[in-house]
Structures are given as C-alpha cells and as structure tokens.
Amino acid sequence: MKLITFAVPCYNFAEYMSHCIETLLSAGEDAEIILVDDGSTDNTAAIADDYAARYPTIVRAIHQPNGGHGEGVNQGIRNATGYFYKVVDSDDWLNEESLARVMDKLRQFRDEGQELDLMICNYVYEHVQDNTSHTVNYENVFPVNRLFTWEDVGHFRESQYLLMHSAIYRTQLLRDNELELPKHTFYVDNIFVYQPLPAVKTMYYMSEDLYRYFIGRVDQSVNESVMVKRVDQQIRVTKLMTECCDLQEVYAAHPRLAKYMFRYLAMMYTICSILLVIDGSEEALAKRDKLWEELKAYDEGLYRRLRYRSLALAANLPGTPGRKIGIAGYHVSQKIFKFN
C-alpha cells in the first residue's frame, strides 16, 4: 500500500498541470498520483498518459467522460491505494519542502501503527492579478505537532475554515463515510471538507504552508461574476450539506465540532444570499427568499440559528439600501481576506 494518494482532477488545464505534477513527484515512491482526465478537449489527456508512461510506479492516468470536479474526486477515492488521500487541483501545487516534512510525519504514523483520520496544514492564496500571497494558518485553533481530538479545538476566526487545500484524510474514512460528490456541480469541495468531519476522531496539525492555491483568473469558478452565474450550483451544494448530517446529534457528541459546522453552514447560506443579491433580479431575490423558507420548513431550529447570525442578517436586509449594505460588507470581506 502506498502512503498517500494524490488525486488530481484535470479538465483543460494542460498549461498548468505539469507544474502541479512535478511538485507531487517530489514525494517519491511512497506516493501515488492519480491524474483524472475529466473529458478534456485540450492536451490534458496526452500529458497525463506521458507522465503515467514515464513514472509507471507512481502515476496513473484515468480518462472519464466529463463529470465535473466532484466526479474526479470520486474517481480518485474509488481507485486510491494510498493510506491517506489528498486532492490537488491541476492548476495548484504543493510546496516541496513542506511536502517532505508532511510525508515524514505521515510515514511515522503509519510505521508506529497510530491511526490518524485527518492531517491539517496551512494553505496559501497565490494571487495572479497583483502577484501577492496570503497564508491561512490554524495556529490559534489547533494544537501544533501533536495528536488531538475535537475537544482540543479552539476558536476559528472568520477567515478560517478547513478547506480542501488544508485537508489530508485517511482514505478508508472517506470510503466508510460513503462520500460521493455530485457530478456536474461546482463548489463540491465544501462537501468534501464538511460531511466527513463527524467521523473524524484523531487529528494532527502541522503549521506548514503546504498547498498553493492559484487564484484570481477571470475564468475561475470562485471569480465573483462566475459565482453569480453558477449560484444554483452553490445552492445545491448548500442544501446537500444541510441534509448530510444532524447537527444536533453532532452537538451531543462533540459540541466544538458542531459549533464549527454550524458556522460553516451559515457561511454557505450567506454566500448564496449575497450572490443572489448581487444578481439583483426579481427571480434571484425570490430564490434567496425561497432558500431560507425551505430551510425553515426543513429545520426551524437550524433556520433560526443560521438566519440571525450577523453576516446572514446583512445578506438579507430588506429594500435597495439593505441590499447595498450587504454587498458592501461582502466586498470589504473580500479585500480583507482575499478569498476570490
């Protein structure tokens, strides 16, 4: 069994993927790299096959009809032979020095027979437009360099969430959780770092700036104008997250985890609301109201807990002045936290 599987969903990113793959190859023979060509129409398939031919003991190329980013992640989980599992988007990359230290620690857990469910590392926003970077770390949230549980977790700031970029899961945990992301849907990485959390018992945090997130291109899925056009997919993901587990049950077992998950879900509903407000059409505003009405019908207690958080309130202020305030607050957050 390999120590780790890196799943790399690839769709028409031929100009970026070689850089990504080269950084993963630095992990050596303990790593498996699964390149999932998601029905690409550029040179992606040929590049994947070339790497698989040159590194047959490390790289595997899988070609599938277009199913979206989530199906690329699913394909990786189905085919992974690594004890641990990490998703790396084909236009992103890993810092090789940090990766070497993370691999050493994962190897230590394996060799000593200690079961680790989730390894957490920092990630870095690498901004294309202004050539700046912004690091998200968790030193105020998690104990550093020791095994811990949810009872040891501190307070997350508004800029801090566990994202796909920061997570390395134990592969079998994902399979036991029956995690399967929806096809042809953007923003499913939110499900990936939300649904499995109640099954996570043991964690380890290394303050390593491991993942480099290439952000700021106009065609990127997190570009604001693109997100407004794809808001229906954001709504779909948010509803799937709402229904994937009972947060009251989570609270009974792990109050600190439940508090974080409530907050994450509130953020998702707020983003949906703000994007619909930015759209500003009557249809979009009706969708915003329907989103909250459906949540209230599904779970009134959850609705009240999420709806009356400060950010959600700002996203739902009535009238044109209220909508302007909500949008302004969102844009201020963008500038401070530089998340898209």
Image (tube, rainbow, N blue to C red):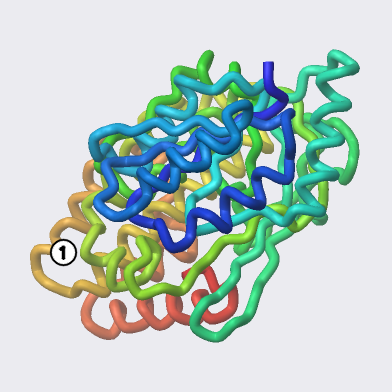
Relative to 313, 28 lies left or right: right
Residue 118 in the image, given as x and y percentages of width and height = 69, 32
Please tell me which residue lies in front, 40 or 234.
Answer: 40
The residue shown at (68%, 22%) is 2
From this view, report whether residue 191 is shown above or below residue 111: below
The residue shown at (66%, 53%) is 94
> Quick one: SS at disc 1?
helix
Please tell me which residue lies in front, 64 or 112.
Answer: 64
From this view, report whether residue 203 is shown above or below residue 126: above
Q: Name the residue under label 1.
A: 284
Relative to 199, 102 lies left or right: right
How busy is the neighbourhood of tag 1: few (under 14 within 10 Å), some, or many (20 plus)? some
Do we see residue 194 in this rendering? no
From this view, report whether residue 23 is shown above or below residue 216: above
Do we see residue 249 in this rendering? yes
**Which quadrant of the structure image shows residue 314?**
bottom left
The residue shown at (46%, 74%) is 216
**Which quadrant of the structure image shows residue 111?**
top right
Residue 323 in the image, given as x and y percentages of width and height = 29, 77
Amino acid of disc 1: Ala
> Which quadrant would the N terminus be assigned to in this image?
top right
Please tell me which residue lies in front, 145 or 315.
Answer: 145
